[in-house]
């Protein structure tokens, strides 16, 4: 399937999922990253008059917000900015006090992702929209997402595309080059990048997923991450009795 077929197919798939749910449109986060940008453009194609991109800075890199707004301007995507800094600060302060310990970087990062999920669903509920997520196959396979955070969505149009395929689709959709070329980052803390945090490159993950090619060390890393994160890809277990 070429990129035009992929773009058209995903646009129609989004339409079908919203229609089947009996709802009116789509809401999605806009982080200034490549995945959320592709989702934003596909969503705009699917629902030109009933899509909303939420820009939700939370002690975030200002450049990411600028990139998100530049993309919204280019494609005429309706956006709403909701600054979560003060809500996040209050919650972290309360939890740190009650736990009598500072929160770890991971705990704080997951709080950011879950606050964004809550904000997205507030808008989606209010408007009668569904929430479109931006997770891709490379992230889903390695568990590189926050449970009930950025995975807390209704549909994942990029869920069968590895990172390299998302980049190709982004180029076809004419996403801004600055967004395509910058190092992937979840924006969880200053200087954070996906590949540094995972200890793997997306190329290594993609080669493993698409071609089953990897060194023994890389294969072990990826398969360990897959096993450790299996609970994140499944609904909560219930007894079989």
Image (spheres, rainbow, N blue to C red):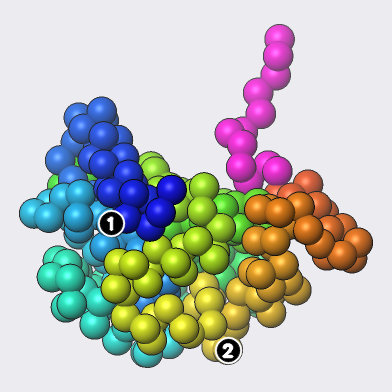
Q: Quadrant of the C terminus?
A: top right
Percent coordinates x, y for residue 127 in the rendering:
15, 47
- State the mark number for residue 101: none
Q: Residues within 10 Å of mark 2 (few under 14, many from 20)?
A: few
Q: Main secondary structure of the magenta part?
A: loop
Labels 1, 2: front one: 1
Percent coordinates x, y for residue 35 in the rendering:
43, 65
Q: Residues within 10 Å of mark 1 (few under 14, many from 20)?
A: many
Q: Give the number of callouts.
A: 2
Q: Which residue corresponds to the image point at 87% horizontal and 58% vertical from the top-left?
A: 220
Indicate left or right for 32 with 162 as reference: left
Q: Secondary structure at mark 2?
A: loop
Q: Which residue corresponds to the image point at 55% horizontal and 88% vertical from the top-left?
A: 190
Q: Which region is colored magenta?
A: 230-241
Q: Determine if residue 12 is in view.
A: yes
Is residue 115 depicted above or below 69 in this figure? above
Indicate left or right for 82 with 182 as reference: left
Place residue 19 in its image quadrant: top left
Q: Which residue corresponds to the image point at 57% horizontal and 53% vertical from the top-left?
A: 137
Is residue 221 depicted above or below 106 in this figure? above
Alpha-carbon distance for marks 1 and 2?
Answer: 29 Å
Is residue 65 depicted above or below 238 in this figure? below
Residue located beneath label 2 in the image: 191
- State the mark number for residue 42: 1
Percent coordinates x, y for residue 9 in the rendering:
32, 44
Residue placed most toward the observer, 186 or 59: 186
Residue placed most toward the observer, 53 or 206: 206
- Examine the structure image and report whether residue 122 is included in the region drawn in magenta: no
- Examine the structure image and report whether residue 240 is included in the region drawn in magenta: yes
Percent coordinates x, y for residue 68 in the rendering:
30, 77
Mark before the other along the chain sequence, 1 or 2 = 1
């Amino acid at each position: 399937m070429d990129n035009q077929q992929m773009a058209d197919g995903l646009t129609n798939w989004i339409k079908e999922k919203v229609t089947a749910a009996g709802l009116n449109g789509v809401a999605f986060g806009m982080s200034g990253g490549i995945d959320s940008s592709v989702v934003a453009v596909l969503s705009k194609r699917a629902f030109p008059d009933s899509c909303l991109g939420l820009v939700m800075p939370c002690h975030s890199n200002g450049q990411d917000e600028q990139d998100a707004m530049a993309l919204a301007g280019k494609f005429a995507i309706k956006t709403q900015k909701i600054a979560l800094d003060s809500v996040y600060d209050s919650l972290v302060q309360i939890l740190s006090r009650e736990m009598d310990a500072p929160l770890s970087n991971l705990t704080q990062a997951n709080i950011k992702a879950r606050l964004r999920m809550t904000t997205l669903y507030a808008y989606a509920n209010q408007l009668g929209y569904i929430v479109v997520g931006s997770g891709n196959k490379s992230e889903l396979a390695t568990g590189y997402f926050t449970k009930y955070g950025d995975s807390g969505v209704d549909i994942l149009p990029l869920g069968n595309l590895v990172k390299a395929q998302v980049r190709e689709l982004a180029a076809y959709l004419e996403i801004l080059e600055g967004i395509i070329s910058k190092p992937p980052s979840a924006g969880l803390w200053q200087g954070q990048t996906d590949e540094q945090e995972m200890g793997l490159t997306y190329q290594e993950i993609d080669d493993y997923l698409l071609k089953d090619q990897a060194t023994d060390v890389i294969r072990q890393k990826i398969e360990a991450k897959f096993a450790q994160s299996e609970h994140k890809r499944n609904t909560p277990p219930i007894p079989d009795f």
